[in-house]
């Protein structure tokens, strides 16, 4: 029903965003040997989902002009 509503081939209904992020990481194969980059301005749910997979979050500061991760800091 979710897929039909969204006009997609497949769909998954999740209880909340944390579960959605967790499922997405599982489907991507993220595990305890991985590092996941996230912006330092985020909800705790983002970091919780990363920790649920056993991966380690790496927080990157945001660019003051667009509030997105500052890509110059990725190195």
Image: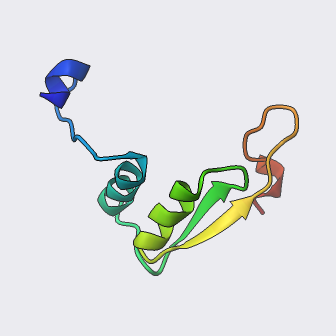
Compared with residue 11, is residue 26 higher up or lower down, i.e. above or below? below
**Toward the viewer: 27 or 42?**
42
- Residue drawn 20% across the image and 36% down it: 11
Indicate the position of residue 54 as horizontal and vertical percent values: 44, 77
Report the quarter where the N terminus lies.
top left
* Residue extending farthest bottom: 33
Quadrant of the image containing the C terminus: bottom right
Identified at 50% across, 65% down, the residue is: 48
Q: Residue at x 45, y 62 (%)?
A: 49
Residue, far left:
1
Residue 68 makes an appearance in the image: yes
Q: Is 51 left, or right, of 31 in this rendering?
A: right
**Residue visible at 77% across and 37% down?**
67
The mark total stands at 0
59 on left or right of 54: right
- The spot of residue 26 in percent (x, y) is 32, 62
Residue located farthest toward the right when viewing the structure as drawn: 64
The colour scheme is: rainbow
> Horizontally, is 42 left or right of 33 in the view?
right
Q: At which x and y percent is residue 21?
A: 41, 52
Q: Where in the figure is residue 40, as x and y percent of width and height?
A: 73, 56
User: Hey, which quadrant is residue 23 in on the image?
Assistant: bottom left
Q: Is residue 7 visible?
A: no
Classify residue 56 by image quadrant: bottom right
């Amino acid at each position: 029903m979710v897929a039909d509503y969204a006009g997609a081939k497949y769909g998954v209904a999740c209880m909340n965003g944390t579960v959605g992020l967790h499922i997405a990481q599982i489907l991507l194969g993220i595990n305890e040997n991985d590092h996941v980059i996230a912006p330092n301005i985020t909800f705790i749910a983002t970091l919780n989902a990363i920790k649920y997979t056993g991966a380690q979050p790496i927080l990157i500061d945001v660019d003051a002009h667009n509030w997105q991760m500052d890509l110059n800091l990725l190195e």
